[in-house]
Image (cartoon, rainbow, N blue to C red):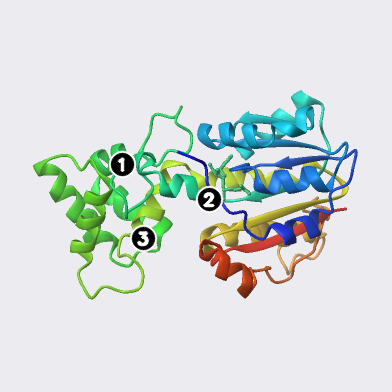
Amino acid sequence: MAFTHVSVLAQEVIEFLRPEPGKRYLDGTLGGGGHTEKILIESSPTGQVLGLDLDDEALAAARDRLSPFGARFISRQASFAAAAGILSELNWRPIDGAILDLGVSSHLLDTPERGFSFRLSGRLDMRMDRRESLDASEMVNRYSAAELERIFKIYGEEPRARRIAAAVVAARRRRPIEKTDELAALIAHAKGGRAGARHPATQCFQALRIAVNRELDQLERFLETGYELLAPGARLVVISFHSLEDRLVKSAFRKWNRSCVCPPRAPVCTCGWSRKAKLLTTRPVTPSAAELKLNPRAHSAKLRAVEKI
Ligand SMILES: C[S@@+](CC[C@H](N)C(=O)[O-])C[C@H]1O[C@@H](n2cnc3c(N)ncnc32)[C@H](O)[C@@H]1O
């Protein structure tokens, strides 16, 4: 199956990163390679990009697409949370700019066998990195009702989390829940009520995906010390697609922008913190109406950017 993904806020990413020849960039979420391709074009003839992704199919597609750029493009199957080590191995630190375009690609959502979609029938998988053993089937069929409730509530902000978790546990006593559409129908039935604009399983599927891939942990790990990867003047751009991610990005960037993180009433500064980066976006940048018309999947995208000082 051909790899399809339309890059979100592509022009804005380039405007923030301002790629230049001779500079090195990190694309921590390579996907189909759309953002990387733009960075490589804008930084011609000598700019370089390291692309990371957990999904082997994304890497294969991006390597193929970006082969005309030769050694200017390097890729690894790895999490962006491991970027520091990989950049050190390559002797690429500090870098001149970085982008994270979080979440899943359209390819993952539209490929039934990857198990991300409640609209398509496939095995309950949801692993971005297929070298990992924990998948959605294991969670759905083995986790306790309390664990499932917590996942649906925290990662899906699903108000009927308890009822849905109980329905999952009751259904799997009869036989294992194996398919995405089976789980989606079960959730819809447990939630009851009238059909709305959104499929009733939307939030629980998002929750399982976040839990399987430990998405928020990965992002938190990156944001803890991500500024250390950047050269002075280098910019980091992050695009998020739901409030849990955006909250983490917003609060990390605010912290990086502060010169002291002591409690507000502390008489003297004892935190030892110093300002790491300048905030370039006080409010997030969102897609234009024209972009949304062409790519409805961009609808919840929020871009935030900082510049290392
Ligand atoms: C929205 S897509 C990126 C699309 C890409 N920017 C483009 O223009 O084609 C997100 C990608 O990030 C990958 N991904 C998600 N979390 C990751 C992580 N922690 N480390 C590396 N890749 C990750 C997914 O597998 C997916 O391919």
**Residue appearing at x 38%, y 33% in the figure:** 134
**What amino acid type is highlighted by mark number 1?**
Leu
Kindly state the secondary structure of the residue where label 3 is placed: helix
Residue 285 image offset from top left, x and y in percent? 68, 68
Give the mark nearest the N terminus, 2 or 3. Answer: 2
Task: Tell me: 278 left or right of 84.
Answer: right
Residue to which mark 3 is pinned: 202
For label 1, the SS is loop
Crowding near the residue tagged with mark 3, few <14, some 14–19, many ≥20 C-alpha atoms within 10 Å: some
Residue topped by disc 2 = 103
Q: Position of residue 309 (x, y in %)?
A: 88, 53
Which of the two labelled residues, at mark 1 and mark 2, occupies the earlier sequence position?
2
- Numbered label tally: 3
Q: CA distance from mark 1 to mark 3?
A: 15 Å
Residue at which label 1 appears: 124
Which kind of residue does numbered mark 3 sit on?
A: Thr
Residue drawn at the location 67% of the way across and 61% of the way down:
9
Residue 261 appears in the rendering: no
